[in-house]
Amino acid sequence: MSVNWKKSTRFKPNVVLKRIQAERIVNPDGKGSSFSGFGVRQDLHVLHSMLKFPDAARDLDQANLIWRALAYTPEDLTKDKFFLKELNNQISIALAKRENVFHVLTSISISNNAHLGCMNVLGVNLECCGATYPRRFVNARSERIFRGHAPTSESPPEYTKVIATVKAKSPSLAISAALRSIDLHRALWCLLYNYEMEIVGHSWMPINMVRLGSVHTVHSQSGALASDNIWFEPYHSPASVYVPQDGSKIKRRIQGILTRIRNCRYGSHITDALLLFVRALDEWNQNTAFIRLWSALERLASPEHGDYDAVVRRCSFLWDDPAFAIQTLEHLREYRNGYMHTGTEMPDAKTYCFQLQQHFRSLVFFHIGNSKRFNSLNDANDFLDLPTDVSALKRLRQSVEFACRFRDSI
């Protein structure tokens, strides 16, 4: 597949490309261009919103690819087909780079006495190595954190140290793949063990029981740094270390869930929703956490249109008292709309996050538990659109059976 313009009459790429062309100065050697103003940086992001990238380019630095296409397109930019041709060429060049093995070092807020061992998640090997990293990594990491002047320090020593081993074309892509893998792993811990409600606690503390460490570094096979960059969590707040009763039992349970997701025909949708969920509840601002968590719910219940009625209907189907579930969801929907349209923040936002988490849990466990039953997410949502009243379902069954007999008789 190749990158193309999104099919929407709202977007007019040539309007933006014309502005960039006016500031474009082709280098004398004909290789590359410079730009006379700073407006191109803003225009680049406008173009980004108009483009649909293929899945193969999901983890590439798309903004840099657009920048290079603008600079290296040999023809007039206002003829957008030339820009698209060069952009696809830049993607091909990026994808053709040889992959290397990288080790991403970070940590998670699980006790380093849990002995979690190794696990493969999304093709990334995660090694939970307890209280310390292997010796070959330690000096390079410590020195880089010291030199980096990052606005955070190393994670608490009680955290489990994690090494994510990944094949990637660059250190930045290695970080992206590693954190996606670690976050999916964390999402399942949080799905299983986050509190359902909080009676006593602080409103500014994130809900997630298992959170990322503060600093991430990328290393080569030898242990040396693979990049002079340092990655860190800008709003990191140390979590209380989670101490599992039986780490090996939990590990087996999580591996079972990952297998179900991997074998599900629409497992990528479940993965995306879980990543939205865990990253939402890492937030210390509970109003922001709620909006991000609602997006996770939408990702499964109404992925294409953001249909709030469908979200309420489909989530309430899973409860033994759907009428009450509808009222709870309508209350959460009302808060969501009020915050989005008027910016009204609520002191009880964390309670609303806990309530919404219950509905997300119910929905995602439904999809995981029925991972082999449906051919697509749309099929699953069609099922959730059925009536909740048993007598109505029986009448519907009679109608379907009659329709089948009728069609067979024609």
Image: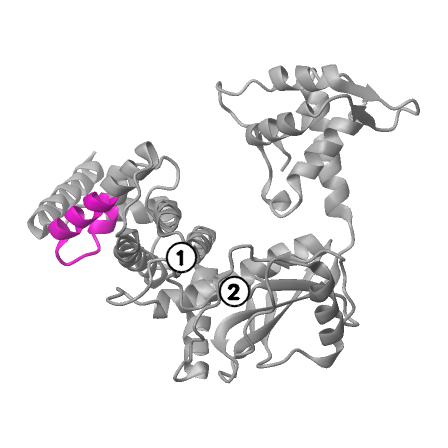
Which circle's residue, 2 or 1, is located before the other in the chain? 2
Q: Is 92 above or below relative to 128?
A: above
Give the prevailing secondary structure in the magenta stretch: helix
In the figure, is residue 106 to the left or right of 69? left
Q: Which mark is residue 367?
A: none
Quarter of the image where the N terminus is located: top right
Quarter of the image where the C terminus is located: top left
Residue 29 falls in image quadrant: top right
Magenta stretch, residue numbers:
312-332
Q: Is residue 153 magenta?
A: no
Query: Which amino acid, by three-letter code, is at mark 1?
Result: Leu
In the figure, is residue 62 to the left or right of 198? right
Q: Is residue 319 magenta?
A: yes
Q: Can you identify the residue that label 2 sits on?
A: 212
Q: Can you identify the residue that label 1 sits on?
A: 281
Which structural element holds mark 2? loop
Q: Is 232 above or below relative to 224?
A: above
Please tell me how crowded label 1 is: few (under 14), some (14-19), or many (20+) other residues with Cα within 10 Å.
many
Please tell me how crowded label 2 is: few (under 14), some (14-19), or many (20+) other residues with Cα within 10 Å.
many
Q: Residue 348's x, y, as percent? A: 26, 52
Q: Nearer the viewer, residue 126 or 20?
A: 20
Which structural element holds mark 1? loop
| Any part of residue 102 in sight | no
Q: Nearer the viewer, residue 304 or 209?
A: 209
Q: Is 264 above or below relative to 41?
A: below
**How many angstroms separate mark 2 from mark 1 (CA)?**
12 Å
Query: Which amino acid, by three-letter code, is at mark 2?
Result: Leu
